């Protein structure tokens, strides 16, 4: 690799960051910068324009990648649940459950954030919804605005790390290629695959650790500054709380268990589980928007769960030469259950459509999905040109020569992503940085699942860091005028430190991310 190519690769990376900071559209900034530098490199005879012919195969790979189909399905699931007022019901009910405790509203926000993360995974929708519903209540009850806004912002970002998460889907797809590339460079021509399922399992325990740390901070504030998080005065709202809790919590819990359980148990791929989640979200929306005559929806929900159980217990392939009687009977039962599912799904779709929610959900899903995939295509151009300049070799040499070996390289990469998170969106960092540094770090001996979870937590922090943390902007847009921007910035500082503490704990105890995938999948 010539010195001119090295210089151009670094200049291209710096130019792309500058253009993104200037506010230009991400996909076109990445692709346009790459094309411009490719032409300049060709003029100086340090880049072969024929390499751009590989874009067609890259785009075709994106189009036929079954894992990426999960992205619009999970987006649809999250938007549907958000528009169906599931979060509102959860916040009201769990707020009453913890209302008699000092800091109870804060506990409820964190727990609802965890449940929404496991059922939606969309940070913007979660932060806005909880900001609209819980922030006025917390302020009315006498909560410190800094604590209230910090809890809401931090809890809303749990969708980045708790599966099913769009970040984990995208990271899993990229790390799968990075792991293959690294293992081939090491001479291993039959590497163990790294899948989205591995990342889902690996992120589960670290996500719960973050939830516990958030709850611990609220408890600490309740002890040292009790006036910052008072109790809710009993106003007679606790009648039939047990029945209300079951009615509100059980359906989302069943949906979460169906999606995550089917993935972890190996019954469904992430894409198939995303389809199950989208179907369940439609059923929950139909029940939530029109509570009357719930029998078709209950029938469909039970049918869906029963079909998942049958699929896990019986071999449903009917193309075999010899099909045991039990499998044939299970197939017939599954066909009958599918009729119940179709009935309830049709009723729910009619209700959601008549309420005007379905059209809005479809449009939002299309916008978010298009944004993700157009950035992916633009990042493919950037990555191809960067590698054409030999930038990947330059990065590999730089990281390999750092003092401390793999640990030193990991610290530098984590610090770089943390700083970039101040200014860039997580999707930009995933598509631009991870394909460059991922193969190098794995080649240095780091576990790809642990690496993926570390990156996911680091990217989660990017939503919280001023001045451009997106969660802060989302909450600022719905917060009342009495809450200042400085309140939000000051309130989020402890949770950023908690995120860093979570990264340190995971770095010291990698088994938090690697034990569950190994226990489940060997």
Image (cartoon, helix red, strand yellow):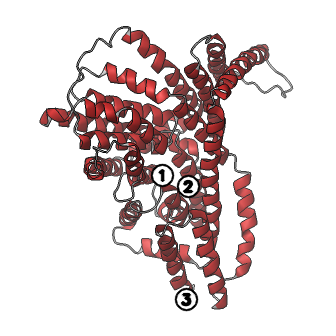
Q: Within the image, what quadrant is residue 347 found in?
A: top right
Find disc 1 in the rendering and name its residue: 452
Position of residue 256 relative to residue 476, above or below, is: above
**How many numbered circles does the render carry?**
3
Spot the residue most to the right.
Answer: 321
Dot 1, crowdedness within 10 Å: few (<14), some or many (≥20)?
Answer: many
Q: Are marks 2 and 1 in contact (CB under 8 Å)?
A: yes
- Judged left or right of residue 280, residue 7 is left
Whichever of callouts 3 and 2 sits on the residue coming sooner in the sequence is 3
Residue 117 location, x and y as percent? Answer: 46, 37
- Judged left or right of residue 11, residue 130 is left
Separation of marks 1 and 3 at Cα, in angstroms: 33 Å
Separation of marks 3 and 2 at Cα, in angstroms: 30 Å
Which is more foreground, mark 1 or mark 3? 3
Whichever of callouts 2 and 1 sits on the residue coming sooner in the sequence is 2
Q: Are marks 3 and 2 in contact (CB under 8 Å)?
A: no
Tell me the SS state at disc 3: helix
- Which label is found at residue 4? 3
Position of residue 421 relative to residue 317, above or below, is: below
Separation of marks 2 and 1 at Cα, in angstroms: 7 Å
Q: Name the residue: 54% across, 43% down.
A: 198
Whichever of callouts 1 and 3 sits on the residue coming sooner in the sequence is 3
- Judged left or right of residue 58, residue 171 is left
Q: Name the residue: 45% across, 44% down.
A: 161
Q: Within the image, what quadrant is residue 115 found in?
A: top left
Tell me the SS state at disc 1: helix
Return the residue nearer the eye: 194 or 291: 291
Which is more foreground, mark 3 or mark 2? 3
- Which label is found at residue 175? 2
């Amino acid at each position: 690799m010539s010195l001119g190519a090295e210089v151009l690769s670094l200049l291209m990376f710096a130019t792309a960051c500058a253009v993104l900071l200037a506010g230009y559209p991400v996909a076109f900034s990445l692709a346009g910068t790459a094309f411009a530098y490719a032409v300049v490199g060709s003029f100086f005879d340090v880049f072969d324009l024929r390499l751009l012919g590989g874009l067609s195969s890259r785009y075709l790979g994106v189009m036929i990648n079954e894992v990426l189909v999960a992205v619009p399905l999970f987006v649809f699931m999250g938007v549907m649940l958000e528009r169906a007022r599931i979060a509102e019901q959860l916040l009201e009910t769990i707020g009453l459950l913890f209302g008699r405790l000092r800091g109870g509203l804060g506990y409820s926000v964190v727990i609802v954030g965890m449940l929404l993360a496991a059922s939606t995974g969309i940070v913007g929708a979660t932060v806005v919804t909880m900001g609209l519903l819980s922030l006025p209540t917390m302020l009315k009850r006498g909560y410190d605005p800094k604590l209230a806004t910090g809890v809401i912002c931090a809890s809303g970002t749990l969708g980045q790390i708790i599966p099913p998460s769009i970040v984990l889907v995208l990271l899993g797809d990229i790390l799968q290629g990075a792991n293959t590339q690294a293992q081939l460079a090491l001479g291993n021509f039959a590497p163990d695959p790294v899948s989205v399922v591995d990342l889902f399992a690996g992120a589960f325990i670290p996500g719960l650790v973050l939830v516990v740390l958030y709850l611990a901070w609220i408890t600490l504030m309740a002890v040292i500054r009790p006036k910052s998080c008072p109790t809710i005065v009993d106003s007679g709202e606790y009648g039939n709380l047990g029945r209300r809790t079951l009615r509100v919590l059980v359906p989302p819990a069943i949906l979460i268990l169906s999606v995550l359980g089917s993935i972890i148990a190996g019954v469904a791929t992430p894409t198939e589980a995303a389809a199950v989640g989208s179907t369940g979200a439609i059923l929950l929306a139909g029940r939530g928007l029109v509570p009357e005559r719930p029998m078709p929806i209950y029938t469909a929900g039970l049918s869906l769960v029963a079909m998942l159980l049958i699929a896990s217990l019986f071999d449903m392939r009917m193309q075999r030469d010899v099909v045991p009687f039990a499998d044939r009977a299970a197939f017939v039962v599954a066909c009958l259950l599918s009729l119940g599912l179709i009935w309830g799904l049709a009723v729910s779709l009619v209700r959601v459509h008549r309420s005007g929610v379905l059209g809005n959900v479809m449009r939002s899903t299309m916008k978010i999905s298009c944004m993700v995939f157009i950035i992916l295509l633009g990042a493919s151009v950037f990555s191809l040109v960067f590698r054409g300049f030999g930038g990947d070799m330059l990065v590999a040499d730089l990281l390999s020569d750092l003092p401390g070996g793999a640990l030193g390289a990991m610290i530098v990469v984590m610090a770089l992503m943390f700083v970039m998170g101040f200014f860039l969106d997580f999707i930009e960092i995933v598509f631009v940085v991870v394909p460059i540094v991922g193969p190098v770090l794995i080649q240095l001996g780091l576990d790809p699942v642990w690496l993926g979870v570390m990156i996911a937590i680091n990217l989660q922090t990017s939503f919280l860091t001023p001045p451009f943390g997106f969660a802060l902007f989302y909450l600022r847009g719905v917060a009342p005028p009495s809450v200042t921007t400085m309140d939000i910035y000051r309130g989020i500082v402890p949770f950023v430190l908690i995120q860093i503490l979570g990264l340190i704990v995971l770095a010291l105890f990698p088994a938090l991310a690697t034990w569950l995938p190994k226990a489940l999948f060997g």
